[in-house]
Image (tube, coloured by chain):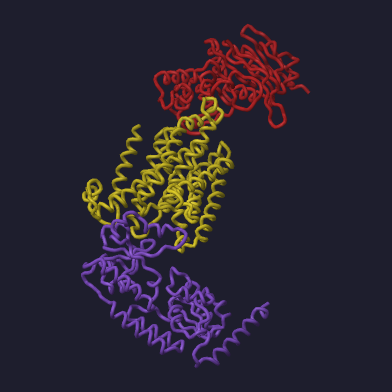
Chain colours: A red, B purple, C yellow
């Protein structure tokens, strides 16, 4: 059974169509990379699929009641907002909100989920530090941990690894792969095509509000698509240690 | 510009000076009163047509027992300009009338007489005679003063063992010994609670001090229209249980000035005292 | 939990102290005995009709203001948001004064708090509309200054136009607040609205926690955002409106209390709500005891005491905001 089914999804900002009849499905076990240049509609697509902004068309997520949706899909917005100096642990515990009955306090299962998420994001040492005092990359990891703690079959994340150091970028993407291997699915938007190629099982190339290509990285990042959607040329090879993708130059 | 301003002013001043000089010795024929208390005595004593204006609050039923009579005359609001334009030959003011207005009127050449408020009930007849003399109505004043003396002597009935009473006015203000109202209260056979509590000159009394002292009667004011928190204090439920079976005694417009009307206040207060029985 | 217990004990102690403070000078034992088992003598009357409603109102007003401050800050994610500073209290006072002067307040028992609630609601809606959902510090404060100034001016206009000679001098009460000589009448008219406000704001706890992550993340966590917004608006308006209707506009309570207590609840906006309610009650009781001890004859206004505590803190917070923006 697919975890997300989107059909004919369209959204407008003013008169401009930001999304134009987009459709795709996400199956368990997939790490879907959402790629495209700035303004291609990546964030809009994710938010519209979640039902966070008005859109026409169908999305299996947007159709769910909010509480059920929150147990089915976790969302990590691009803006890394942490309004109050709560501890990292408290921040991650917010991911457990959908699992708490009205008025209930977190129980052992919730604490275990939080501890696991902290460990997965390498945050054990920072667990009791105020989240607002961390570096940008550390905050991003804390927010990913929050998403992990939500413990949902589907994760949607908007540029979750932007600003992380290379080691933690890899670790985060590895984590997404591990989650997919557990039978979940992850949809991430990315600007780093190298990371996308190495860690995503499938890419969605968004161009001018439409899906320009959908498939394995190799099939999506063709020279033609790269030129059309990004205006770049790149070096793409399969090596013994996996695919390597390196953008070379912007095309005139 | 300066000439434009000063010429009419000088003309008016000259006009007033000449009018004053001509009529200095005769009884004044155009009298303006700008004080609530002189308003009332002047209304009682003046010859028909002699009084040309009284203060605006003299026609307010809440403050003036002679508001009906006052309404027959044009009101003034105590400003030098409007009083000057009435071209009076005598202006009656209180000692507490705005000194800048009084000074200005005198500089413009008007005769302004400031009549002190009577300090006690026994000073009221002299106050009446003084205004009578200023108006050239000595005989009328003497009659009024004499009848005041007679009536006061008949009503005055102090009682050192009388019930305690307290004035409780908006914002918790109370009247203390030395005030005319206190004298009326004691003349009616009450003792003023403020005297026992040693409250300094017309100060405030805390609601709970009042309730704890438990006076036999509360004297309070009538209400103004609109609403105020100052007056809302007089509705506090805690007062209901100390104000006695007849409720608070409302001190009306006759309590404000030392005029013969204050004897009406004394009379109705004495009647209440009689109904309350021995203290 | 331990924090709430400590605060409860503090409120209880200050409540008792408030009952024992006053010019009538009864002994503590006598006063409390009269309160519990008196039979109509003067001391009973003073305790039951004057001091008890005053102390109860201190708790109710303080809790309402503390809670409203914590909820507004949580919702706007802005530590400077406070009912007094952003003009909600002065608008509520304006509503109350209009009701009193037009006679609407006398038309039915709850007319006064209804009018105050109307004024408060107007201001909350205006601030929310002007500042937007994220409530940037600058816009919130600017909106508040404008609303406060307008409400203050209209308030003094209404009082100036009143036919009652005492009304005009009462601007001070409405802008600064006081609990002097309030009675059970005030307790009963304020209670239904305050209770409704407390419940509404209490229901925002989880939503405010989630909002730490921003609107989008909170929405995706299953928080019904429009319901949360409605609860925050109505709850603040009801609690602040009722408090202002009976005690005038008391500023800074909702600023000082959440600020002091935030570290004790690890900055969690939801947990800050009950703590701020208790803390607000304690602060207003303490201030109301102080005004009676410092200048017993002068009906010193509560807002004056609060400003001495709150204004320096406010300046400090502005300074800190500036550093964060730099």
Relative to B163, residue C275 above or below? above
Task: Give the image location of residue C135, x and y in percent.
Answer: 55, 39
Percent x, y of residue C182 = 37, 52
Expressed as whole percent of the image width and height from the top left, the position of residue B117 reads 39, 78
Q: Quadrant of residue A137?
A: top right
Identified at 42% across, 27% down, the residue is A103
Location of the N terminus of chain C by quadrant is top left
Q: Is residue A53 left or right of residue C96?
A: right
Is residue B271 left or right of C224 when viewed as pictured? left
Q: Along the horizontal axis of the image, is A54 left or right of C27?
A: right
Give the farthest residue toward the top.
Answer: A240
| Residue A27 can be seen in this image | yes
Residue A1 x, y percent position in the rendering = 57, 10
Q: Residue at x 52, y 61 (%)?
A: C161
Vertical arrangement, residue A175 with respect to residue C123, above or below? above
Query: How many labels sit on residues?
Result: 0
> On the rendered image, what quadrant is the C terminus of chain C found in?
top right
> Farthest residue toward the right?
A252
Asked which quadrant contains residue B249, the reply is: bottom left
Q: Is residue C312 visible?
A: no
């Amino acid at each position: 059974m697919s975890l997300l089914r989107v059909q004919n999804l369209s959204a407008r900002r003013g008169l401009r169509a930001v999304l134009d009849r987009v459709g795709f499905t996400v199956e368990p076990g997939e790490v879907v990379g959402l790629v495209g240049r700035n303004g291609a509609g990546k964030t809009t697509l994710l938010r519209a699929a979640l039902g966070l902004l008005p859109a026409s068309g169908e999305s299996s997520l947007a159709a769910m009641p909010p509480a059920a949706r929150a147990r089915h899909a976790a969302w990590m917005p691009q803006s890394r907002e942490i309004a109050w100096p709560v501890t990292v642990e408290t921040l991650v515990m917010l991911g457990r909100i959908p699992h708490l009955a009205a008025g209930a306090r977190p129980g052992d299962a919730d604490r275990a989920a939080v501890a696991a998420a902290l460990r997965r994001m390498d945050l054990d040492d920072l667990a009791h530090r105020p989240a607002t005092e961390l570096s940008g990359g550390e905050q991003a990891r804390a927010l990913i941990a929050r998403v992990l703690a939500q413990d949902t079959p589907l994760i949607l994340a908007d540029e979750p690894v932007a600003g992380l150091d290379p080691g933690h970028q890899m670790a985060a993407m590895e984590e997404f792969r591990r989650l997919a291997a557990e039978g979940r699915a992850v949809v991430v938007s990315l600007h780093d095509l190298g990371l996308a190629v190495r860690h995503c099982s499938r890419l969605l190339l968004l161009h001018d509000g439409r899906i320009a290509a959908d498939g394995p990285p190799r099939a999506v990042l063709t020279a033609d698509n790269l030129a059309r959607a990004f205006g770049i040329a790149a070096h793409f090879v399969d090596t013994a240690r996996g695919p390597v993708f390196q953008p070379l130059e912007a095309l005139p | 510009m300066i000439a434009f301003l000063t010429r009419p002013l000088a003309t008016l001043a000259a006009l007033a000076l000449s009018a004053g000089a001509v009529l200095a010795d005769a009884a004044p024929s155009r009298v303006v009163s700008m004080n609530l208390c002189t308003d009332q005595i002047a209304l009682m004593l003046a010859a028909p047509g002699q009084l040309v204006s009284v203060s605006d609050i003299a026609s307010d039923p809440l403050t003036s027992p002679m508001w009906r009579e006052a309404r027959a005359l044009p009101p003034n609001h105590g400003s030098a300009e409007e009083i000057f334009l009435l071209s009076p030959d005598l202006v009656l003011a209180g000692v507490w009338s705005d000194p800048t207005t009084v000074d200005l009127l005198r500089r413009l050449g008007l005769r302004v007489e400031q009549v002190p408020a009577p300090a006690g009930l026994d000073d009221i007849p002299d106050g009446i005679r003084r205004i009578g003399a200023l108006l050239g109505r000595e005989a009328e004043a003497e009659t009024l003063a004499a009848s005041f003396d007679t009536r006061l002597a008949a009503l005055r009935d102090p009682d050192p063992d009388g019930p305690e009473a307290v004035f409780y006015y908006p914002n918790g203000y109370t009247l203390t010994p030395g005030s005319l109202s206190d004298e009326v209260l004691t003349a009616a056979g009450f003792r003023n609670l403020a005297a026992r509590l040693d409250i300094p000159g017309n100060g405030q009394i805390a609601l709970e001090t009042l309730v704890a002292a438990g006076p036999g009667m509360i004297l309070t004011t009538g209400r103004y229209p609109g609403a105020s928190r100052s007056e809302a204090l007089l509705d506090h439920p805690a007062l209901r249980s100390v104000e006695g079976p007849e409720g608070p005694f409302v001190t009306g417009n006759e309590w404000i000035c030392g005029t013969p009307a204050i004897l009406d206040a004394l009379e109705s207060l004495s009647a209440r005292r009689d109904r309350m029985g021995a203290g | 939990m331990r924090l709430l217990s400590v605060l409860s004990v503090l409120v209880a102690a200050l409540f008792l102290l408030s009952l024992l403070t006053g010019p009538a000078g009864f002994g503590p034992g006598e006063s409390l005995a009269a309160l519990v088992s008196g039979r109509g003598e003067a001391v009973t009357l003073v305790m039951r009709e004057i001091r008890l409603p005053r102390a109860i109102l201190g708790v109710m007003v303080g809790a309402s203001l503390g809670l409203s401050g914590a909820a507004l800050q949580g919702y706007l994610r802005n530590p400077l948001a406070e009912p007094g500073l952003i003009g909600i209290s002065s608008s509520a006072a304006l509503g109350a004064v209009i009701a009193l002067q037009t006679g609407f307040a006398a038309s039915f028992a709850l007319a006064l708090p209804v009018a105050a609630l109307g004024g408060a609601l107007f201001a909350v809606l205006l601030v929310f509309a002007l500042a937007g959902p994220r409530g940037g510090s600058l816009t919130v404060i600017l909106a508040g200054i404008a609303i406060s100034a307008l409400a203050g001016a209209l308030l003094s206009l209404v009082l100036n136009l009143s036919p009652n000679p005492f009304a005009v001098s009462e601007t001070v009460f409405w802008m600064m607040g006081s609990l002097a000589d309030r009675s059970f009448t005030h307790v009963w008219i304020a209670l239904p609205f305050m209770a409704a406000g407390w419940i509404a704001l209490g229901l925002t706890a989880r939503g405010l926690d989630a909002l730490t992550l921003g609107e989008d993340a909170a929405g995706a966590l299953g928080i019904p955002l429009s319901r949360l917004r409605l609860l925050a608006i109505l709850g603040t308006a009801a609690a602040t409106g009722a408090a202002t209707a009976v005690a005038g506009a008391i500023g800074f309570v909702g600023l000082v209390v959440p600020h002091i207590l935030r570290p004790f609840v690890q900055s969690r906006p939801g947990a800050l709500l009950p703590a701020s309610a208790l803390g607000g009650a304690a602060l207003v009781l303490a201030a109301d005891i102080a005004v009676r001890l410092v200048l017993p004859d002068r009906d010193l206004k509560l807002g004056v005491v609060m400003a001495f505590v709150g204004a320096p803190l406010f300046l400090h917070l502005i300074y800190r905001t500036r550093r964060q923006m730099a």
